Amino acid sequence: MHRSALAVFLGVVLSACSGAAPTATTEPALPEKRLALSFDDAPMSDGPILTGDERTDALITTLADREAPPAVFFVTTQGLGRDNGRARIERYVDAGHLLANHSHSHQGASSTDPAIYIADIDEAERQLAGFGNRRAWYRFPFLDEGRPLERRDLYRSALAERGLTNGYVTMDTYDWYLNDKWRRALAAGQMVDEAALKSVYLDMLMASVEYYDELAAESLGESPAHIILLHANDLNAHFIGDFIDRVRSEGWTLVSPDEVYADPIATQTPQTLITNQGHVAALAIDGGRSPIGMTHLGIEEDQIDALIETRQVFGER
C-alpha cells in the first residue's frame, strides 16, 4: 500500500475506534482574484465619437450601475483647461472615485530633460491640490520610469521627496490602440460593427488579465491585488460594463486601488529598467524571467490588427 493511502486508512480506523466519524475531505480554496480599475489621461478632449461630457457621463453611470468600487483616474492636468475638463474631474470625485497624478503634459521620462520632467510633475501636483479624493500616487506616462539607471534613480528620489509613490500597473493593455483604430476608421468614413469591436476589446483585455495573473503566479508565487491600465477614452465609455461583467464571470472581485497599493508587492521595488509592461512583469524580470517573448494579444498590434480583420470590425460603406 502507498504510504499516503496507508495514512488515510489508519486515520479512518483510529477515528472509528474513538467513536468519531471520519471528516470529509474538501478541496483547498482557490486564491481570491482581485482587480482594481484605473483610467489614465483624464480628462480627454472632445472627440468624433463622444464629447468629454458624454464620456464622463458614460463612465460614471456604468461604474455605478455595476456597483463597482472606486476606480482611480490618473489626471493629466493640461486637460483641465479645455472641454469642461475641471468640472468633469470634479464629477468623478463627487461619484466617489479617486484621483492621482499622471503628469501635466504626458512626457516620456527617458527622453525629457530631468529638470523639465520633474517640474512637470510639480505643475500637476499644483493643479490637483484643490481636488478631493486625492491619492499620493504618480503614474509614469508610457510606464517609462526613466533610463539610464542614474535618471531612473533621480526620478525615484524626486517622488520620495514629494511624498509620492509609484502608481504602477500590474496589467498592461492596448485599449488606447484599439480606440485610435476606431477613431481613424470613422475619420476615413468606414462602417463600424460595434458588436465585433466589443468582442475584440473584451478578448484583448481578458488576454492581459490572464497573462499577467499567470505571470504573477509563476514568478511571484501568488496572485496579488492587480490593477489594470485603461484610459478614459470612448472605447471604455462604451464597453467598460461588459468588461466588468466578464471579469466577474471569470471569478474576479473588483476592489479599490487602495487595496492594490497596500498589497505586499507594493513594497518590492523593481531593479530592471524594463518597466513598460508594469510591476508584475518587472518583478518577474528581476527574478530571472527573460523579457524576450513576454507578450500576448492584449499588447501586440499585429495580433490586434489580425483580429480586427478576421472579425470585420471596420468596412466600407
Image (cartoon, rainbow, N blue to C red):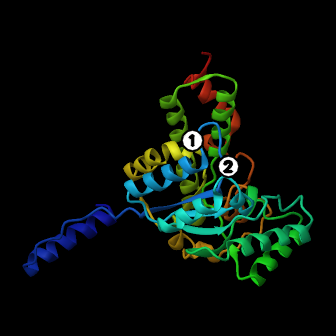
With 263 as the anchor, is 19 left or right in this view?
left
Three-letter amino acid code at the position of disc 1: Met
Q: Is residue 122 above or below residue 284?
A: below
In the picture, residue 150 is in which quadrant?
bottom right
- Farthest-out residue, top: 317
CA distance for labels 2 and 1: 24 Å
Identify the element where label 2 is drawn.
Answer: loop
- Residue drawn where x is 40% and y is 48% of the image: 245
User: In what quadrant of the picture does the C terminus appear?
Assistant: top right
Check disc 2 and report the residue beneath it.
Answer: 45
Residue at (70%, 78%) from the top-left corner?
164
| Badge 2 amino acid | Ser
Residue identified by numbered label 1: 204
Q: Is residue 155 above or below residue 32?
A: below
Mark 1: few/some/many CA within 10 Å (<14, 14-19, 20+): many
Tell me if residue 63 can be seen. yes
Find residue 88 and report its horizontal and vertical position in percent.
58, 59
Q: With 264 as the anchor, is 167 left or right in this view?
A: right
